[in-house]
Image (tube, grey):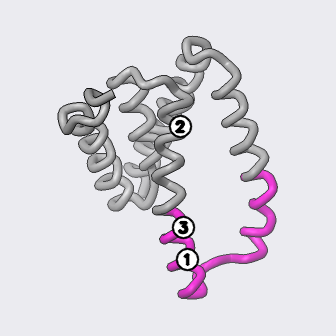
Amino acid sequence: MGDLFTLDALLPFIAIGFAAQIIDGALGMAFGVISSTLMVSVMGVPPARASAGVHLVEVFTTAASGLSHALHNNVDWPLFARLVVPGVVGGVLGAYVLINVAGDVTRPFVMSYLSLIGLYLLWKSFRA
């Protein structure tokens, strides 16, 4: 158990989080895509564990961002209301699939999805 919490074991995750946050800060998006992709493909973390880790971190950063936007009246509340139910359903369904399907089965689909999202973000960055 002690080996899991050494600095050497944490440094790769810190580096991935730092790189993903630098890019997210510049683009305003892509933290989850970058950190999930690197954890699954480079570090060999199972997709369910990578998703849980990324979403745990995003709960706090997104809450801070959302609160800031709400306090500055920068929220389209009717659009928010239309997106809440589909967003929750999609999140619960995605978590259910990742938990109940073996990592070896989901890994190719998750990697394909993340690769497509990454390519889409690159395409958008050159069009802006």
Per the model, the C-alpha gap separating discs 1 and 2 is 23 Å
Q: Quadrant of the C terminus?
A: bottom left
Q: Quadrant of the N terminus?
A: top left
**Residue beneath label 2, please?**
51
**Residue beneath label 1, please?**
67
Labels 1 and 2: the sequence-earlier one:
2
Per the model, the C-alpha gap separating discs 1 and 3 is 6 Å
| Residue 80 figure quarter | bottom right
Per the model, the C-alpha gap separating discs 2 and 3 is 18 Å
**Residue beneath label 3, please?**
63
Amino acid marked by disc 3 = Ala
Please provide percent x and percent y for residue 40.
Answer: 43, 26
Direction bottom: furthest residue: 72
In front: 82, or 92?
A: 92
**In the image, is residue 125 above or below residue 102?**
below
Task: Tell me the SS state at disc 2.
Answer: helix
In front: 116, or 16?
A: 16
Amino acid marked by disc 2 = Ser
Direction left: furthest residue: 8
Taking the image as shown, residue 104 lies to the left or right of residue 94, namely: left
